[in-house]
Structure formats: C-alpha cells, structure tokens
Amino acid sequence: MLWEIGVLAAVAVLLVFLGLPLLSLLLRVPPAELWARLLAPASLTALRLSLVTSLAATVAIAALGVPAAYLLATRRFPGKRVVEVLLELPMVLPPTVAGVGLLLAFGRAGLAGKALAALGLSIPFTTLAVVLAQVFVACPFFVSAATAGLREVEARYADAAATLRATPGYAFRRVLLPLALPSVLAGGAMSWARALGEFGATIMFAGNLPGRTQTLPLAVYIGFQTDLQSAVALAVILLILSFTVLLGLRLAHRPPRLPWVGRAPGDAR
Amino acid sequence: MLRATLAKRRGGFALDVAVEAPAGGTLVVVGESGAGKTTLLRLLAGLDRPDAGRVAVGERVYFDAAAGIEAPAWEREVGYVAQDYALFPHLTVRENVAFGLRARGVPRHDARASADAALDRLGVADLALRRPAELSGGQQQRVALARAAVTEPRLLLLDEPLSALDLGTRQVVRGELRALLSELSAATVFVTHSPLDATVFGDSIAVIENGRLTQVGARDDLLRHPRSAYVATLLGVNLLQGTVVSRDAGGVAHVRTADGMLAVADPGADGPVYLTVNPQEITLYSAPPAGSAQNVFRGPVIEIVPEPPAGDRVRVALGTSPPLVAEITRQAVAGLGLREGMPVYAGFKATGVKAYH
C-alpha cells in the first residue's frame, strides 16, 4: 500500500511539473485571440516556412535513412559501431554545436563551403540551411526506429525469403520494408516532429530572416522579446502539432499479428 | 542427388559431417537438440557459410571451399521449411505460396495457378485468401510445405517439421507428409529429434551427436546393428566395442575391449567389432557366479527402474566398467535383496553377445 502511494505520488509530481507549463501556455491566450494572432501575416509566414522545411527535411531523411537503416539492420562490417554512434550523435549533441559545425563546414571558408563557393553557391542563411539543420538534428530518430524495425523483421523472415529465391533487393521490397513499415513511418513522424521544433542549429546556421529562415520556434523566440501574446499563440500551435503527432503514433501502433507457431486461433493449446 | 561434406566451427561447437541423399529419397538426420541439425540445414541452404567442404546437388556445385565456389541462398534450387515456418504475415496464403515463383519472375497469373494447385495438393486450397495469423499450427505447416514444394526444388530441407504440432495433428500430418515426400523428385534432408519420425521418414538415417554423424545407414541395418550410443540407448541395448583376437571352433570368439576380454558369439571374421548385449541376457549375482556365464563384471547398483512401469520386470543400471543395464524380474530383485549402492556381479554368456562389424 505504501509502495503504491509512493509510486502514484512520484508520477503525480512529474505530470504536474511537465503539464503546468503546457497548461499555462494554453490558458494564456483566449481562443478567439489565438485564432486572430495565428492568421496574422507574420505568423502564417513562419508556419508555412516551418511546414515546408520540416517536410522537406523528413523526405530527405527518409530517402537517405532507409538505406542506412537497411545496412545497419542486415549487415556486419568493420567500423559498424562507429557508424552507429555517428548516426546517433546528433540526438545528444547540443543543437548549437550542430549549428557551429554546419557553419564551419558549409560557411564561406568551410571544407564544403569553399567548393560550393567556387560553384557560386552559398548555403548559410538560406532556406536550404534551415532544412540542412533540421536533417542534421532529426535524422537519428528516423534511423534508429527504422533500424530496429528492419532488424526484427530481418531476423525472422529474411532467411525464408532467401530460400524462396528472393534476391536481397526483392526481399527488401516485398518482405522487409512492408513488414517494417510501421516502424519506418513512426521514425518519420518522430523526425518530422523534431525537425518542426528545431531551433538552436537553425539560428546559428540559417539565421533569423522572416520569410526565409524564421521558422515557428524562431518566431516564438523573437516574439517573446517583442510581442508575448503572438509568441504564445505560435507556441500553442507547436504544442498542438507535437502532441497530435505523438498521440497519433500511439493510436496507430497495433501489436503486430505474427503467426505464432502451433498456437493460432484454431488451436487448443 | 545431394552430396555434401561440411565443416563449421562456431565458438566451442564444431560441425563436421558428410551427407548424401538420392533424388526422390529422404535422409533423416536424427539427434538431440544442440547436436547441429539446424546448423547442417542452414549450411546446405546457403544461409551460413561452411569453413570447409563442398555441397553439390546433381551436377550443380553450390559450394566448394577448395574451388572458391559459393552460390548465395537465393541462387540455389533449395526448399527450406524452418521450424517456425516463417510464413510472411502480411501476405495471404496464396501470395505466400506464390512468393518463390514471383521472386524468379514467373508472371502473376501463372504463379497464382501453381500456388493454388500446390495448396490443393495439400488439402488447404480453401485457405488461399487467409493470412497466416488466422491459421492453426497444422494449417501453417501445410502452407509452409506448399510454399517450399511449389518451386520444385532439387533439394528440400525440413527442420523438425512436426515438432511444433500438437499430438493429434502430428499423427495426421505425419501421414500426409510421407505421401508428399514420396511424390517429390527432390532429395530431402529431414532433421528431427524424434526417433519415431526418423524411422517413419528415413530411407536412410544419420545419427548426429555433438556435431558428428555417429551412425549412418539404412533404417533396418541401423535398428538391427546399433553402432552409436544414441541408437543403442534408443533400442535399450548395451553397446560395446572391441577387436576380435581369436576364434574357437565352438563358435565363440574372444574380443579385447577397453575393459578386458569378452567371449562372444563368433562374428565370422577378425577385426574390430561392435557388441550388443540385450539387458535380458544379463543375470545378477550377489557372489561371484560359478555357472555358465562366461563374461562377469563387478560393480554397484546405480538405479532400479520398473520397465514397463506396471510390469513385473525392472531395469537395473550398474556402475560396472563398462556401464551395463540388466533387465530382471521383481522376484529376482527381492531374492537378491537388491538396493541402490549394493555391489553385484553381472554375468552373461557368449551366446548372449551379438557381434558384428
């Protein structure tokens, strides 16, 4: 009994601590005013930019992340641990560090920046820089979820596919990817939510140019110093989007129906 | 026709075997779990790479360590039914069975027709549109077999195909599977831990113990002439080994074993021999016997087990060297005052020992 009370008390403290700031955001601006502030041109611009960049980042992450996840899930190779750590690192790296790194790499004097400058291209402080910053910080969420999903499916079904004369490519298209799709989509959603909330790397690498690089989180930060009510309205939008993504993931997740050997609906066992 | 020699080392376990199975015939590899049965199948299928050896089916060489040949699994004409069947949960039964045909480019319509025919052959045509999760264990097993057989493999590998089924289903499927295997032109390798399945399915049987084949032969020879501890234990006979050193005119041969000389029924030739002693041929004494027993060993009683449990006979395990099992009546146990730990003499006549090369 004492144990039960202790557990519940600890959970209550945690939920209040996490919920109070969120509730404060929701209560700060009356719904009617919230709507008006959202429809203000500056807010709409930031919202549109955020949606476009985060979706572009998610597409790029999926395109590059699926092969990476496949490799990590199905192959053994020297240096695999190092590759795994590299792909995880942005998850724990402070985003400002990522921003400095991106700037040093793609800036005018950077390793890649010099080559790009020779071609007349400059990435920092452009919308592309926003996308790159988002890809950098959000890709680990996709890769780790997709790898876990593919690994589980591969362990169980890859051998069966191979003995049925499926080449690795055919097996991936017809068996591994379809079966791992829930994990891949979950990884995509997590990455998108992370990209949407990205702030630190973006402001370092892309700056804060309204209409070009000022995404929602940046607009919230700027608004905080000039127009608190607008900042709160944008923050509420971010909050609702993030909450919806995570809840949607929970609801969409159904325990997979695997055919458990010798123990199926018809069997008395 | 399958001819394979395989060696594979993994951690402390080493597999080192040579197997053969004729086209249309079945080789059963029987042994305890952990003896290397699944490893053997995975090496044949190309799912793992042998350290050394050669795998050939007919004129096709799938693996040859010396020649540097290694065909990947998806290029081998092999059907493999894993112990858990591994049916694809996102595909219907028909799509599962058609998968192997579609994977090699058979047009959708033709693949479907072949899949339906294979399902019909196994009596599960009515399940074509179901998903694996909706099937019973026996149904999954039939679908897995249909999926492997529809591609007309030249080598069919079955990993404990009956062990996941409950007892009643197993009886039925055993009969069906026998009929199916007799129709296929593939060489079949069937691994099992069940001696019953081994004798039902094996035209020839290989006993695998700790990564090595300890006895290979036709079913009848295997049962009549045990040459491995596994088969001897299975048949409940005492198995010894030795070398014939002399043969009398009276039909008795003298054999040197690791534990001394034995007088045995003359096997008809010199050289190394296997010896089996039926437990019923062994008599127990509390004092050194003076009578007609030519072979006597002394040792403590280790265990007394009724055999069968309700019958009037018991099996007595002895700590002699070599260890022996005797089968005597309950009256004899009472008469000797037999109990565990008690030292006894075990005697048997030369005519009670069967010797063969």
Image (cartoon, grey):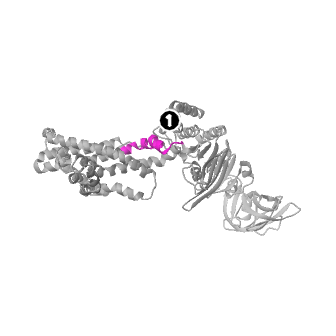
Image coordinates of residue B258 in percent, x first then y, are: 73, 68
Q: Residue at x 59, y 45 (%)?
A: B158
Image coordinates of residue A223 in percent, x first then y, are: 13, 48
Q: Where is residue B115, by image quadrant?
A: top right
Residue type beneath disc 1: Glu
Helix, strand or loop for disc 1? helix
* Residue B296 located left or right of residue A204: right
Q: Which residue is mark 1?
A: B95
* Residue A229 located left or right of residue A268: left
Q: Is residue B240 visible?
A: yes
* Residue B313 located left or right of residue A236: right
Residue A157 in magenta stretch: no
Q: Badge 1, how many Cα within 10 Å: few under 14, some, many 20+?
A: many
Name the image quarter holding the N terminus of chain B: top right
Q: Where is residue A33, by image quadrant?
A: top left
Q: Which residues are magenta?
A: A164-184
Residue A165 in magenta stretch: yes
Q: Quick one: which residue is furthest to the front in this view?
A: A118
Considering depth in this image, is B192 or B56 the residue closer to the camera?
Answer: B56
Considering depth in this image, is B311 or B154 the residue closer to the camera?
Answer: B154
Q: What chain does mark 1 sit on?
A: B
- Image vertical order of residue B233 relative to residue B142, above or below: below
Image coordinates of residue B71 in percent, x first then y, are: 56, 48
Image coordinates of residue A26 in percent, x first then y, are: 17, 45
Q: Main secondary structure of the magenta part?
A: helix
Q: Quick one: which residue is furthest to the left in this view?
A: A226
- Image vertical order of residue B200 relative to residue A3, above or below: above
Considering depth in this image, is B81 or B73 the residue closer to the camera?
Answer: B73
* Residue A146 located left or right of residue B25: left
Q: Is residue B309 visible?
A: no
Name the image quarter holding the C terminus of chain B: bottom right
- Image vertical order of residue A117 relative to residue B12, above or below: above
